[in-house]
Structures are given as structure tokens and as C-alpha cells.
Image: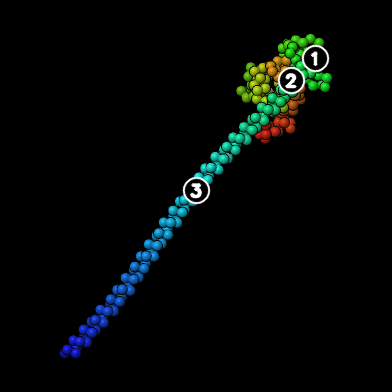
């Protein structure tokens, strides 16, 4: 009987030992998986943090790039504006240089064929009489542009923004108006371009306007359309 009890006790202890080993093994597996999951979670958190940092850096660089592009466009626009103003001032200076710097004849023409401004009236129509603003014949003018839309007179070389405003104030808004001027009418315009007298004839406005009024283009008007002058 005691032998049977001893055998049973031994068998029980053996089963308990096996159960303990199984429990330890299961616990190890559970602990190991938990550690791996924890490590994986930490890795994912680091990766998310890096992604957020990269996104923030990209957003900042994009903002700086857009700002640089905007500044560049403003700079280019200002350069074109200054170049246009400089061209207009150069043209004006070529015509309005002080008379003392030249040996001018009575008609304002210099010995080298250039034309300078004179202190008194100029005989623009060539009739032998300097009549001031009454030179030649006044062309037909308009109170405003036809249909409320004026032609871009800046397409004509020699007419910048200031000159266009002056032409409009005199009643000239369209290419066909300028294209139709007679010699006497051009003389009147030359005499009445305050601060720019003689420019209409000197810069050959009529010839350019005739091309533009017929739907054609000039080399200068192409530059204006391409944004290479005033835009």
C-alpha cells in the first residue's frame, strides 16, 4: 500500500514539475512577445517623429522658395519698369538738351542733323513763322476712346506711359488717329507735346501707327507684347 502511495506521490511531483516547466516556457514566450511589441512600438514612434520633422522642414523650404520666387518676380517687374523709364528719359534728353550745347540754326536743327530744344517757339510746319502751339493744323480729336477702350499707344516706339497719358489728354487714343495725320497735323502735335516737343515726327509715330492700325506688328510692338519693355 505504501509502495503504491509512494508511486502516486512521485507521479504527482513529476506532473507538477512538468507543469511548472510548461508555465515557465509559456511565460517566457509571452514576455518575449511583449518586449518585441514594445520595441516595435518605440521604433514606430521614432519613425513618426522623423516623418513629422521632415514634413515640417519641407513646408518651411517650400515657403522660403515661394517667397524667393515672389521677390524675383517683383524684382524683374521693377527692372523692366525702370528700363522703360530710362529709355523714355534718354529719348527725351536726346531731344531736350540745352540749346547752349549746340550751334542751332533758326529752325532748331543742329549742324550734325540732330534736333535740340530751343527756348523759343519752333517752326515745326516749315512756313517760316514760329507760331508756338498754333503750328500746323490741329488733327481731329476724341473726348474719349471709342467704345471705352483705347489702343495701347505704348506699342509705338517713343510713346511711354507718360507720353501715352499726354496723348490721351490731347484727344488721341487710337492708332488710326495717328496713322491719318497729315504733315501739318503732325506739326501741330509736335508743337503741343509739352515737354516732348517734336517727338511725334522724330520718332516716326505716323509710320508705326499705320502698321499697327492695319493689324500688323513692328519689332518694338513685339517686344512690348512679349513683356520685354513695360510689364
Tag 1 residue: 107
Return the x and y of residue 111 as percentages of the image width and height: 83, 19
Quarter of the image for the N terminus: give it.
Answer: bottom left
Tag 2 residue: 97
Which mark is in front, 2 or 1?
2
Q: Earlier in the sequence, mark 2 or mark 1?
A: 2
Q: Where, by quadrant of the figure, is residue 178 drawn?
A: top right
Quarter of the image for the C terminus: give it.
Answer: top right
- Residue 185 seen in the figure: no
Q: Residues within 10 Å of mark 1 (few under 14, many from 20)?
A: some
Secondary structure at numbered mark 2: loop
Q: Looking at the image, what colour scheme do you see? A: rainbow
Secondary structure at numbered mark 3: helix
- Extreme residue toward the left, this view: 1
Vertical position of residue 140 compared to residue 223: above or below: above
Q: Toward the viewer: 158 or 174?
A: 158
Tell me whether the residue at label 1 lies in contact with that at label 3, contact meaning CB atoms closer than 8 angstroms: no
Indicate left or right for 47 with 8 as reference: right
Q: Toward the viewer: 63 or 183?
A: 63
- The residues tagged by marks 2 and 1 sit, at their Cα atoms, a distance apart of 15 Å
Q: What residue appears at the point 81 percent right and 17 percent down from the top-left corner?
A: 103
Tell me whether the residue at label 3 lies in contact with that at label 2, contact meaning CB atoms closer than 8 angstroms: no
Tag 3 residue: 57
- The residues tagged by marks 1 and 3 sit, at their Cα atoms, a distance apart of 71 Å
Indicate left or right for 31 with 155 as reference: left
Q: What residue appears at the point 70 percent right and 33 percent down from the top-left corner?
A: 223
Q: Where, by quadrant of the figure, is residue 7 drawn?
A: bottom left
Return the x and y of residue 197 as percentages of the image width and height: 72, 18
Amino acid at each position: 500500500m505504501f509502495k503504491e502511495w509512494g508511486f502516486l506521490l512521485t507521479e504527482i511531483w513529476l506532473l507538477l514539475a512538468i507543469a511548472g516547466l510548461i508555465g515557465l516556457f509559456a511565460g517566457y514566450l509571452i514576455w518575449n512577445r511583449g518586449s518585441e511589441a514594445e520595441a516595435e512600438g518605440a521604433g514606430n514612434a521614432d519613425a513618426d517623429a522623423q516623418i513629422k520633422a521632415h514634413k515640417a522642414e519641407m513646408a518651411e523650404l517650400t515657403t522660403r522658395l515661394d517667397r524667393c520666387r515672389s521677390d524675383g518676380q517683383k524684382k524683374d517687374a521693377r527692372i523692366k519698369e525702370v528700363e522703360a523709364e530710362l529709355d523714355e528719359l534718354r529719348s527725351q534728353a536726346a531731344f531736350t538738351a540745352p540749346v547752349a550745347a549746340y550751334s542751332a540754326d533758326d529752325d532748331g536743327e543742329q549742324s550734325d542733323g540732330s534736333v535740340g530744344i530751343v527756348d523759343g517757339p519752333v517752326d515745326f510746319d516749315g512756313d517760316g513763322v514760329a507760331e508756338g502751339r498754333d503750328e500746323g493744323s490741329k488733327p481731329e480729336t476724341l473726348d474719349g476712346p471709342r467704345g471705352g477702350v483705347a489702343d495701347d499707344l505704348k506699342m509705338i516706339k517713343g510713346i511711354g506711359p507718360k507720353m501715352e497719358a499726354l496723348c490721351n489728354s490731347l484727344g488721341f487714343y487710337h492708332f488710326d488717329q495717328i496713322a491719318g495725320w497729315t504733315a501739318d497735323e503732325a506739326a501741330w502735335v509736335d508743337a503741343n507735346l509739352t515737354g516732348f516737343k517734336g517727338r511725334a515726327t522724330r520718332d516716326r509715330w505716323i509710320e508705326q501707327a499705320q502698321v499697327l492700325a492695319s493689324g500688323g506688328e513692328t519689332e518694338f510692338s513685339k517686344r512690348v507684347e512679349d513683356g520685354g519693355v513695360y510689364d
